[in-house]
Image (spheres, helix red, strand yellow):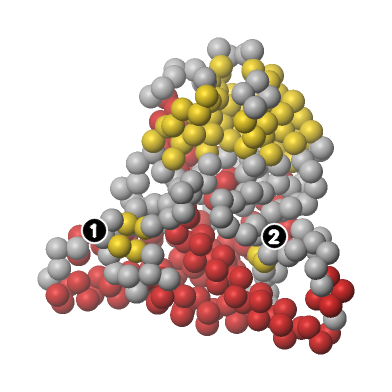
Amino acid sequence: MNSISKRGLSAPRGLDFFNFDIYEENITEEMNKQFSSKIRKNSEEVPCHRCRIKGVGVEKWATKEAKPIRHLIKNIFIVIFLVFWVFSGLLPSQDAKIKPVLLKDNLYLLSGLGGNIVFMITEEGVLVIDSGSTTEHGKQITEAIAKITAKPIKYLIFTHYHYDHTGGARGFAPDVQIVGHSKLEKNLIEKSKRLIEKLALPQFEIYMKVLTAKVKKLEADKSPQLDAVRRQLEFVRSLYQELKYLKPVRPDIHFGKKKIIHLGKETVELIYQGPGHTDDACMVYFPEKKILHTGNLFLNRVCPFIDELANDV
């Protein structure tokens, strides 16, 4: 994967990628090599994120003879997943800037933190979907909203339990009502820590190792890129420390199949269709605007990931 250039990361249209301060094309290849060695250990301990096609070879997939193939596919998809995750929002640039994009009327998308963070302004307050990975992300989101409206944030909706969607909740005011599916709280308590320890932290450790080596090389070469890479390394170290000691914020409001929120003159529908990306993943529908926020149930030009840690599959 030679996806890094001096202009930053190239990405399919519609995906939010961060503009890294690293200009070596071989960095993803190096990370891929190191991921592979760690995957051999971690893939046996954490169920993988993999793509499964309904009705195609399910019986054959489950046979004992298929185990070596399953293991190979598991490793391949975990490597793909981790590399995708690294470059799609979990490891942003320290210089990343949040930009509000008007979708329709009073509904906005916040680009710059990865994923699709959406907020809606009403006469009674603001509703936000997802909070980013860290407390700092949460603060950046609330600050970006405050530049557009003085209305208070009333609701924060978690589309699912993964920490890159829930980790920024501590950056919001304590009186904000957090909404999530009834299974989400259990996943936050029981599964978030394992996901972070087995997948996220090893990913950060590898990335810090690659950056540290790069700093040494740039120091020896007296390169003008040195300061930028040093800043990126310090930034990643700070994110690593926050994730290492992250304490999830639990939802205040739970729902099952569906929940309707009325805020001002607006109606928002939270819809749960059963296990998918996770077993707590929901969609958020704005009926007046005919806009559907799918969370991670739908990805642009990327095969959906099934988190078996949070699915009975």
For residue 11, side relative to residue 66 (left or right): left
Q: Determine the residue positioned at 62% across, 31% down.
A: 291
Q: Quadrant of residue 222?
A: bottom left
- Which secondary structure lies at badge 1? helix
> Is residue 242 in sight in this rendering?
no
Q: Is residue 123 above or below residue 40?
A: above
Q: Is residue 168 above or below residue 206?
A: above
> The C terminus is located in which quarter?
bottom right
Q: Nearer the viewer, residue 286 or 188?
A: 286
N-terminal-most mark, 2 or 1: 1
Residue at label 1? 228
Neighbours of disc 2 within 10 Å: few (<14), some (14-19), many (20+): many
Q: Is residue 195 above or below residue 101?
A: below
Q: Determine the residue positioned at 64% across, 34% down.
A: 292
Residue at label 2? 306
State the separation of the CA atoms marked 2 and 1: 36 Å
Q: Residue 66: x percent and y percent?
A: 78, 83
Q: Determine the residue positioned at 72% across, 33% down.
A: 270
Q: Residue 53: x percent and y percent?
A: 75, 63
Q: Residue 3: x percent and y percent?
A: 38, 65
Q: Nearer the viewer, mark 2 or mark 1?
A: 2
Q: Amino acid at mark 1?
A: Ala
Q: Determine the residue positioned at 72% across, 79% down.
A: 70
